[in-house]
Amino acid sequence: MASGALCSILFFLLVLTAGHANPAANKPQQQLVQSTCNSTTYYDLCVAALAADPSSSTSDVRGLCAIAVSAAAANASSAVDSALSSATADQNQAPERAALLRACAAKYAEAREALGAAREAIKGESYDYAYVHVSAAAEYPAVCRALFRRRQRGAVYPPELARREEGLRRLCTVALDIISLLLVP
């Protein structure tokens, strides 16, 4: 459901920024965003994420790809903060759970680092490497889920982490779909 909240926030930003642009002057760029997002699995999320960044109005597909990767990195950063906050709150009452949450924060931090490496690869037009880094970033949260499943039998995976995992997975999927456009000769 956090991905729904993320979509709502990004849609709000889209509406807010769209009201300040000259629609006639921005029509070709809107078409580029739309045609790029038509090639993705999550069209609405793609449009919202790209439109939330003002630089999308002057970006080419490579720039739109970098924006999508940055949106995923922002999601991963937010997940790090949330997991660490939850770990601090649980430290005294549930130390094992707090340790797992810290491990999850570390996995999201690794995802954020992989996304940073993907941005650098995009800058250097090394799209195959960017694809590998974004793919890795999408998988790091799954390790968190596996840790909870193995270490706390019968425990419920924290719903907030499940939402963040799904949000990051979707944003990474959008980024991978756009990178795929750049890989085509």
Image (spheres, rainbow, N blue to C red):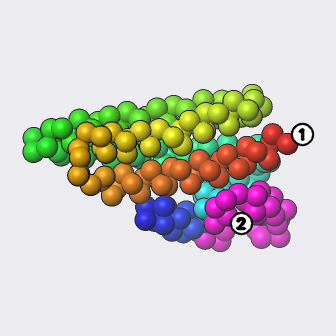
Magenta stretch holds residue 170: no
Q: Are marks 2 and 1 in contact (CB under 8 Å)?
A: no
Residue 151 rendering spot, x and y as whole percentages = 25, 39
Residue type at mark 1: give it: Pro
Q: Is residue 8 left or right of residue 35?
A: left
- Which of 107/67 is in front? 107
Q: Residue at x 61, y 57 (%)?
A: 49
User: From the viewer's perspective, is residue 27 above or below residue 91?
Assistant: below
Residue type at mark 2: give it: Ala
**Disc nearer the start of the sequence (2/1):** 2
Q: Which residues are magenta?
A: 15-44
Q: Secondary structure at mark 2?
A: loop
Q: Which residue is mark 1?
A: 185
Q: Is residue 134 left or right of residue 127?
A: left
Q: Residue at x 30, y 40 (%)?
A: 150
Q: Which residue is mark 2?
A: 21
User: From the viewer's perspective, is residue 125 above or below residue 15?
Assistant: above
Which marked residue is nearer to the observer: mark 2 or mark 1? 1
Question: Which quadrant of the structure image shows residue 11?
Answer: bottom right
Q: Residue at x 75, y 29 (%)?
A: 126
Query: Which quadrant, please, contains the C terminus?
Result: top right
Q: Is residue 51 visible?
A: no
